[in-house]
């Protein structure tokens, strides 16, 4: 019998509206993937303001859509909404259960991914070098704002074994949220590499909500049915790891070989060696068969032994940024934008303000495409100039922005306008430091807490 | 003669990890896949992106889905939360890649990407409110 898992969230800020369609369709597990790298940085800022935060605060909205099915015993929920404060997320979940007048629901919390308080100890036992730049840990700029290991599916399976209806984790590998219920239901062994790879592939295909169901498409994007009612995807996974990727029939969207292959390589480096905590999956091995009617069958996934390390992500302060946008009309819009950028930079210098990095982008010229935009003689009808800058402190970043304002009357040429109302103040920049930590240094600290809500 | 990958029917998806972006390019059929596999090298892509990509470019193949996957190092201005770029996650790099032109045979020379039909969007926006 196939296990039906669904991806009900692709990021913090996604909509829970499509969750109702999934639950009505009949799913065994609703997996909510709330954490991008950027999200942890956002949650870190949130927790700096209030120690009781640090989880994705749209969790109650998702639970409200799912809990009736959970209470009826039809569906279980697994989410990494815990962010950098899973215990706080669980408190919010328990309040949501009680607020809906429900009881008898068991909520489990996975703890132990947070390495923030252990970094000094870990640094004595492992290298913690930067995976991308190769820099040694001695080059890391303290203080560490968060440090999270990407745990695998095991603690989630432990939580399900302990009777959990709702499992809340912090940082776990995205696909592990989906692999865990498959391991639990099909009783896959932890060294059954091909099946663990199949479950990881399913998780990867489902973790970005609408992206495998016709969202963010390239070729033929405009013909996707009812794109305002884009569904989230469902996988029906057999005991041998073969899976059918589909969507709720009543929704819009599209599931085809093309929509699925778009998601297959999303945020992947070497597709023959997709590194996850539980397995190294070969995404070049599966066969995809488009059965029509929004059904894509995937089988034959190969895997090999997992590595002895977890990926971990460390975060440090990286200065303060400010930004401003002004638009220019024809004639000479592109040249006016260029001149205004130069004048702005000179005025900031004259004001004695120290800027560590400048970025000027001209929308309508090459803001997004940069050097890939072919040269043209055609004059753009209008251009938007975006200026961004990085300073050592927030006050300087704010003062820099004020040097653009006088150009309203004292700019170089007519036809410059502000864009929209208001504008944000300085924003803190955060640097990411991806690294590896031996599993043997992390696993002893991983635990689950189980609570039955009465 | 030269044609853009987009005009040859190639799809794309871009994603980010730290300061690394990846762009997958999907061929519409085996013949185009064979062609782009020989033409669209890591070096070509590195040159195409110029100053946008400061680090090396790696290329991987996924023949089961007729795709090439390009990994662009130091491509996001320091990575999402540290970057000053408007597109700090590299969401638009896919379109930038399929703008790349390659040499094609005469029979592929008249290939053009179809313009999208968004009449449905006009209908929605023009409806009485």
Image (cartoon, coloured by chain):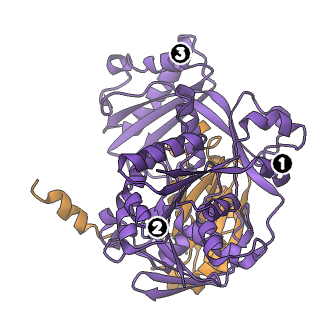
Q: Residue at x 57, y 81 (%)?
A: B32
Do the residues bearing badges 2 and 1 touch, measured as CB atoms within 8 Å?
A: no
- Name the front one of labels 1 and 3: 1
Q: Residue at x 81, y 55 (%)?
A: A309
Q: Position of residue A32 (x, y in %)?
A: 50, 58
**Of residues B118 and A348, which is closer to you in this image?**
B118
- Image quarter for residue B116? bottom left
Any part of residue A25 in sight: yes
Q: Earlier in the sequence, mark 1 or mark 3?
A: 3
Q: Which chain is purple?
A: A
What chain is tagged by disc 2?
A: A
Dot label at residue A441: 1
Mark pair 2, 3: CA separation: 50 Å
Any part of residue A374 in sight: no
Q: Colour of chain B?
A: orange
Dot label at residue A75: 2
């Amino acid at each position: 019998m196939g296990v039906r898992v669904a991806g009900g969230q692709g990021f913090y800020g996604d909509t829970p509206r499509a969750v109702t369609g999934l639950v009505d369709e009949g799913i065994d597990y609703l997996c909510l993937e709330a954490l991008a790298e950027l999200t942890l940085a956002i949650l870190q800022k949130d927790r700096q303001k209030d120690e009781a935060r640090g989880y994705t605060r749209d969790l109650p909205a998702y639970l409200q859509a799912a809990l009736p099915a959970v209470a009826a015993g039809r569906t279980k929920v697994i989410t990494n909404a815990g962010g950098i404060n899973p215990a706080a997320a669980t408190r919010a979940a328990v309040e949501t259960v009680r607020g809906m007048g429900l009881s008898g629901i068991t909520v489990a919390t996975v703890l132990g991914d947070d390495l923030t308080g252990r970094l000094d100890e870990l640094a004595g036992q492992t290298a913690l070098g930067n995976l991308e730049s190769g820099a040694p840990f001695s080059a890391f700029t303290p203080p560490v704002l968060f440090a999270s290991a990407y745990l695998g599916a095991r603690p989630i399976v432990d939580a399900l074994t302990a009777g959990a209806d709702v499992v809340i984790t912090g940082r776990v590998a995205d696909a592990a949220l989906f692999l865990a219920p498959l391991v639990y239901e099909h009783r896959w062994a932890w060294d059954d590499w091909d099946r663990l790879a199949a479950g990881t592939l399913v998780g990867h295909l489902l973790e970005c909500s609408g992206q495998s169901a016709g969202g963010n498409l390239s070729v033929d994007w405009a013909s996707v049915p009812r794109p305002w009612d884009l569904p989230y995807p469902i996988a029906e996974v057999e005991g041998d790891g073969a899976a059918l990727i589909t969507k709720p029939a009543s929704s819009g969207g599209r599931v085809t070989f093309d929509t699925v292959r778009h998601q297959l390589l999303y945020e992947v480096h070497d597709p023959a060696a997709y590194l996850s905590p539980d397995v190294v999956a070969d995404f070049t091995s599966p066969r995809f068969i488009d059965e029509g009617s929004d059904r894509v069958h995937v089988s034959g996934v190969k895997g090999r032994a997992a590595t002895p390390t977890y990926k971990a992500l460390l975060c440090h302060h990286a200065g303060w940024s400010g930004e401003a946008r002004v638009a220019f009309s024809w004639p000479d819009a592109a040249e006016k934008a260029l001149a205004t950028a130069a004048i702005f930079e000179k005025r900031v210098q004259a004001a004695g303000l120290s800027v560590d990095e400048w970025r000027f982008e001209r929308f309508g010229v090459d803001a997004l495409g940069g050097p890939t935009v072919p040269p043209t003689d055609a004059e753009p009808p209008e251009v938007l100039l975006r200026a961004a800058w990085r300073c050592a402190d927030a006050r300087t970043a704010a003062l820099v922005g004020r040097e653009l304002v006088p150009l309203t009357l004292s700019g170089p040429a007519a036809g410059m306008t502000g864009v929209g109302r208001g504008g944000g103040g300085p924003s803190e920049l955060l640097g990411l430091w991806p690294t590896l930590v031996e599993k043997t240094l992390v696993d002893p600290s991983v635990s689950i807490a189980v609570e039955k809500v009465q | 003669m030269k044609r853009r990958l987009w005009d040859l029917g190639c799809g794309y998806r871009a994603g980010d990890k730290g300061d690394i972006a990846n762009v997958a390019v999907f061929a519409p059929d085996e013949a185009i896949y064979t062609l782009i596999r020989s033409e669209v090298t890591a070096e070509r892509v590195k040159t195409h992106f110029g100053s946008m990509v400061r680090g090396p470019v790696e290329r991987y193949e996924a023949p089961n889905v007729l795709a090439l996957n390009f990994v662009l190092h130091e491509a996001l201005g320091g990575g999402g939360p540290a970057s000053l770029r408007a597109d700090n996650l590299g969401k638009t790099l896919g379109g930038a890649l399929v703008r790349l032109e390659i040499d094609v045979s005469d029979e592929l020379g008249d290939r053009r990407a179809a313009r999208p039909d968004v009449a449905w969007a006009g209908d929605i926006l023009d409806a009485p409110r």
